[in-house]
Amino acid sequence: MKKALTILVAMLFLVVAVGVAYSAETTFNGQYKVRGWSNWNFDKKVTNPTSERGRYDGYFDQRFRLTITHTRSEFLKAVVQLDLVEDTWGQQRNFRINNSTTGNLVRKAYIEFTLPKVGTFTVGKQPALLGYGLAFADSGGLLDGLKWSNKWGMVGVSAMYFKFDDNILLGGASEFYNRDSQLWLLDVAITPNDNHTIELFGGYADFDAGMPATHNFVYNFAGPAVPPASPFDDVDANLGLVGLAYTGEFADMITVKGEFSWLFGRADLANWGMNDDAWLSGHNLYLDVAYHNDLMTIGAAFIYGSGDTLSGYNANHYNVNFITADEFVFGNIIASGNGGLNDAFGGGLGFCDDIENLTAAKLYFEIYPLCCDGKLSLNAAVIWAKWTEDVGAGTPYGHPVGYYGTVYTPFGYASTDLGWEIDFGLSYEIMEGLTYSLATGVLFTGESFDYNVGGVKQEWGPIWTVNNNLIYEF
């Protein structure tokens, strides 16, 4: 792997050198990030899973991300983004992992060219975002495809085709055997002026996968479900997507953001000896209103993600509200996006890298103290959250933490009580190009987290996370 990496980097620099010789413009920019993670009570110690025995995970990860942009003219450019270093190293378990040996070395690699009056074409591995990403978002190098875009006055249109994966040759022993997924998307952005944008989007996704399959609208065997002993069965999921997003600025001091999106379709699980059809339907709502000036920002936000009680299978194993990796961030624990490079929690709990079955509201603020010449910012948030549909005993959803594979038995009743979260963070520019940031959160869990050990109710207790970041940008 290291030899191949060295050859690839050498080839890239050779291409750059040739480009410079032809008087084209080449730019380098990137980021080196070192993060220290401390998570407690997201899961319990296996040796004694009582409420006093929360599991602690503490480790560091680091990543060097390099972006090379080679611009031939205003009509033609090529972009390559590489994650050259992805290391995880920890203190309490004495592990050191080079994630780049198994991860995605190339996150972006595309050519973009413009034909006058026809439009702009982007071909290759590229990022994509619809609305605020509640239903569709990806920047991790998962999508290869083609995008065409053009603009006529205040109306801009983009049409996209992406191949998500095509793994027929991996063989039946692979979890991803026969996975073949593709997406067709359309986005229309209406910008009557610089202060307001209305975005209409929609599309169709087709997923075929071998069993067992994970994520992305196909069945996941994590948790209590037991797969059949028979050979892998194909899964076919056909999904539609529609949405509306809005961004507005009023009087240069009030920002309004919002998205409503709906996904619908069906999945066919062949030869299960039960109803093969799983009907999928999920919808999202996001609203955010903030007042801001040069010294502070204060705002309120609301998010709603529907549950799934009708599909006929363990509901939280169908991420019914989004298609690819959700990068939407609402809090430091609740709906926190993706986690660390070696984080089993995906940013914290099964619901935290998507918003399925989540209803939450928050008040937040950020201040920029005069004493620090704009280099320091402080932020905090208070979040109230509930489950949209009951979780626990007798519901399509099991215990909230059962998502990871450890089965916790809910204590005798269903509940929508998720809890309260308090967040705090800061960002400080140490010097030009070097920034330190801190993100902390405490979730005071509600009754839905109660679980049964030998007939005795155990309260889960608070969950906390601390994330330290040292970021060098160039």
Image (cartoon, helix red, strand yellow):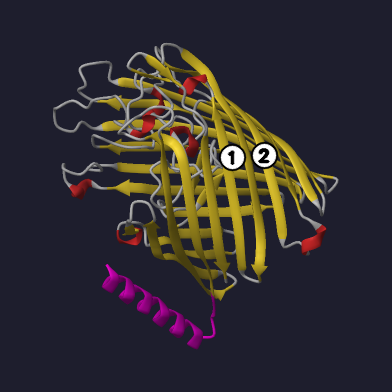
Question: Which segment did they paint magenta?
Answer: 1-27
Label 2 crowd bin: few (<14), some (14–19), many (20+), radius 10 Å:
many
Residue situated furthest right in the rendering: 251
Outermost residue, left side: 230
Q: Earlier in the sequence, mark 2 or mark 1?
A: 1
Q: Amino acid at mark 1?
A: Gly
Amino acid on which the number 2 mark rests in the picture: Ala
Residue in view at x 66 percent, y 35 percent? 382
Mark 1 closeness class: few <14, some 14–19, many ≥20 residues within 10 Å: many
Does dot 1 land on a helix, a strand or a loop? loop
Q: Quadrant of residue 256?
A: top right
Q: Residue 161: which numbered mark, if any? A: none
Instruction: Assign the magenta stretch its main secondary structure.
Output: helix
Q: Would you name the residue on which mark 2 appears?
A: 381
* Mark 2 vs mark 1, CA separation in Å: 8 Å
- Please provide percent x and percent y for residue 206: 37, 37
Q: Is residue 315 magenta?
A: no
Residue designated by label 1: 331
Q: Nearer the viewer, residue 40 or 115?
A: 40
Q: Position of residue 340 (x, y in %)?
A: 44, 50
The N terminus: image quadrant: bottom left
When the figure is inspected, residue 454 is found, relative to residue 282, above or below; the finding is above
The residue tagged with tag 2: helix, strand or loop? Answer: strand
**Are the two marked residues, 2 and 1, in contact with CB atoms closer than 8 angstroms?**
yes
Q: Horizontal placement of 157 versus 265: left or right?
A: right
Q: Residue at x 48, y 20 (%)?
A: 448
Q: Where's the C terminus, which quadrant?
A: bottom right
Residue 301 percent location from the top left of the image: 68, 34
**Can I make out residue 170 in this image?**
yes
Q: Nearer the viewer, residue 85 or 155?
A: 85
